[in-house]
Amino acid sequence: MHSLRFSDIAGILETKPLQLQTDPVIESLLTDSRKLLLPAGTLFFAINGPQKNAAAFIPSLYDKGVRCFITGNDLAENKIKDLPEAGFIRVADPLAALQQIAAYHRHRFHYPVMGITGSNGKTIVKEWLYQLLNNDYNIIRSPKSYNSQVGVPLSVWNMNDSHALGIFEAGISLPGEMQHLQRIIDPDIGIFTYTGDAHSEGFENLQQKINEKLQLFTNSKVLIYCADDELLEESVNAFKNAANNELLLFGWSKKMAGGLFINKIEKQEDATTIHCTYRETGFNFIIPFTDDASIHNAITCCCVLLYLNIPVSAIAAHIYQLRPVEMRLELKEGINNCSIINDSYSADMNSLSIALDFLAQQQQHQKRTLILSDVLQSGYEPGDLYKNIAAILSEKKLFRFIGIGPQVSAHASAFDNISNRIFFDSTDAFLKHMASLHFQDETILLKGARIFRFEKISHVLEQKMHETVLEINLNALRDNLKQYRQLLHKDVKLMAMVKAFSYGSGSYEIASLLQHAAVDYLAVAYADEGVALRKTGIRLPIMVMNTEEAGFGNITAFQLEPELYSFNISRSFDNYLQQHHISNYPVHIKLDTGMHRLGFLEADVDELCTFLERSPQLKIISVFSHLAASDEKAQDDFTNGQATLFASMAATIERRIGYSFLKHIANTSAIHRHPHMQLDMVRLGIGLYGVDANLRLQNVTTLKTTISQVKAVKKGETVGYSRKGVVDKDSVIAVVRIGYADGYPRLLGNGSGKMLLHDELVPVIGNVCMDMTMLDITGIEAAEGDEVTVFGEKLPVSKVAAWAQTIPYEILTNISQRVKRVYYEE
């Protein structure tokens, strides 16, 4: 489809490849070694990260069959010669090379391209335009929200001759970035969704951010935007005059005539009617949404359709059919100890590769199953399409493959390399035979085009859930991890704390993500937590912090690494190793420098060193201590004293035993408050989950419940046990499905705590019960089944903890196991 050979790529970059043995056609561009699909046609770009030397991944990719690489000039000649069958292109900046190749590729095609930017709504507008236009155009679009400096070129690379329209979104976080994306997308039709504060950290002010984003439209023919945003309107006109005089401005407004005039917006119970005037002709259309963001995005889409000369009657018919955009991959518990990944809103090659990568991250079951519908509008001939899909799946080591749809069934022979495979012509046919397939102890990925209605399958496969759920945003956790990594000095390792069920967020699900993200170490509280992780496929080194004699067998059987904190536990473990003829077993030595919890004191060091010198059974991997108050400025002198004492004690141990080991003392807050204490490794805990007052982190966990009943209560009546909740006026009370057995503290009763209902804070009334809590929702329209947020993005867990006179750790770790966890990636 791409017909660019490796030598052509070198020509585009105006250089010559090194030791080129063959000259393959490049089918896919790869920047993440974990996402390899088809090695033979892959070109890998060694793009370094803050703590990542990407060239280190080249040998393993070579072993998997990749033969084409673009690297920085720092790759040594001897490293190249070690891989004799590989071809290399050396450049000053592999990211710039990726962008240059994508820009060249984009300009090989002459059909229209839309470019979308803005602070919010980019992905929604892109997906809605796809819904509205895919019957008239074969569309290539950004998968999910691939809108970054790397995501945009990977998206544009998928353009080919079969397409008739491209739709790509572009997001930036720093000045100067949009110029690179403009050269790649170079849109004919420009769309600016919203201005706003999202992703504003890298800009001086909103004006600068708007001006930077407008650079995307330097060569565009038209720009579609909301003219009622005064700052945007002013900036757009200045941009037109200074940078693109030929730019047609297509604004929509509720205030002034121009492009599209919005006469009136009428919200009904579950729909909105929008009355418009365009070129002196009035018309209206209805959208099946009532929120302001959806109304804004739908009007923007309407402007695009008007610009494309689509009749208003067709616009009205199509816009009424708009569907919500599922922005995330969800991981839920399923029947028969299965895990279900639901990604059933689209089926195309780009989103399939993203979903398969998410499936590969899951290590909780050895068996992995893919249920895939026909892949529609791929741009490939069906024979080539399913041959390519089968080749990708053969690399994924699936337990079984289930194809649903007439096309995939007609090409069943393409999947002969997958031993366990079965095909059905329709979703209903699959459901009829589902019982005979015996789903048990496996991770199942549902990947279906919307017309196949895979939600019917997910409904049957998913375990019926308690209506109180804890949602865990894996993207947010990844982003928080990235923020801390960017603060680390070069070569500093990172240990992630997953003790206490990963602070209530789940064990293997979080550990799988951290393993995929290549952290160096995990830490658990007890050996059985480590055993559970090993049984779900976690291979990372795992430190056990509370070592007990009863756990020695599991520690050695599952290659866990114990923390030794006292002479008693150290000698007991040493004796156990001697009895089992084990030597050089990895252990971690805990020093007490002032926390006075666990650990060897300064006075113990001489005796400790004597013990270690005489124990060939033990191999010291690390020596560490714990800071008592690293987050408190008033305690900085004490914290610095701990670090000084630790350095002295660790140096003595290192000198006496005669070899070096990792040293670590920095916890979450010390990573940024005391960067000189990062040493060889840091331990990242609660910050992963979005709790750190000194950093702007993303919210990871959201606890939600629903209303089970709404009732009117008269003034003077009481609510709940012991009649503690006295109603001082005629009120409306909502009973929600959460109580202290779910982890909602009783201290939050009687007005101390609040929850969010329809974005409004409502107080708890009466005592919190075991399974239920009552809320005073007087003045708010609500009904049974409505969603209530206990904590999350708009009601931080830190605030709930303050109301409960405790800390976020306690709130998070007390969430009951009966509260189902739902994991998702945007």
Image: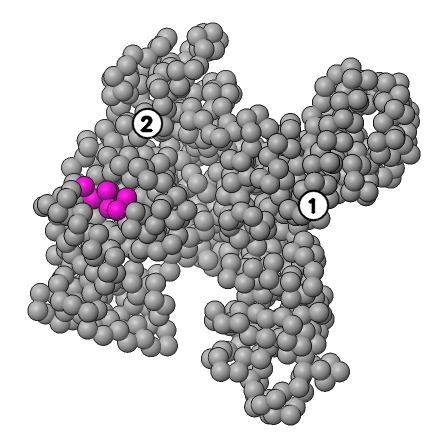
Magenta part, dominant SS: helix
Viewer-side label of 1, 2: 1
What range is drawn magenta here? 211-218
Which three-letter amino acid code belongs to the residue tagged 1?
A: Gln
Where is residue 254 shown, x and y percent of the image? 21, 69
- Is residue 537 visible to the viewer in this orientation of the structure? no
Element at label 1: helix
| Label 1 sits on residue | 635
Tell me if 658 is positioned left or right of 231 in this view. right
Q: Residue at x 55, y 84 (%)?
A: 732
- Is residue 610 visible to the viewer in this orientation of the structure? yes
Cα–Cα span, label 1 and label 2? 46 Å
Name the foreground residue: 560 vs 292. Answer: 292
Where is residue 243 shown, x and y percent of the image? 15, 42
Tell me if 529 is positioned left or right of 801 in this view. right
Is residue 503 magenta-colored? no
Which three-letter amino acid code belongs to the residue tagged 2?
A: Ala
Where is residue 668 shown, x and y percent of the image? 63, 42
Is residue 216 magenta-colored? yes
Where is residue 99 shown, x and y percent of the image? 30, 30
| Label 2 sits on residue | 96
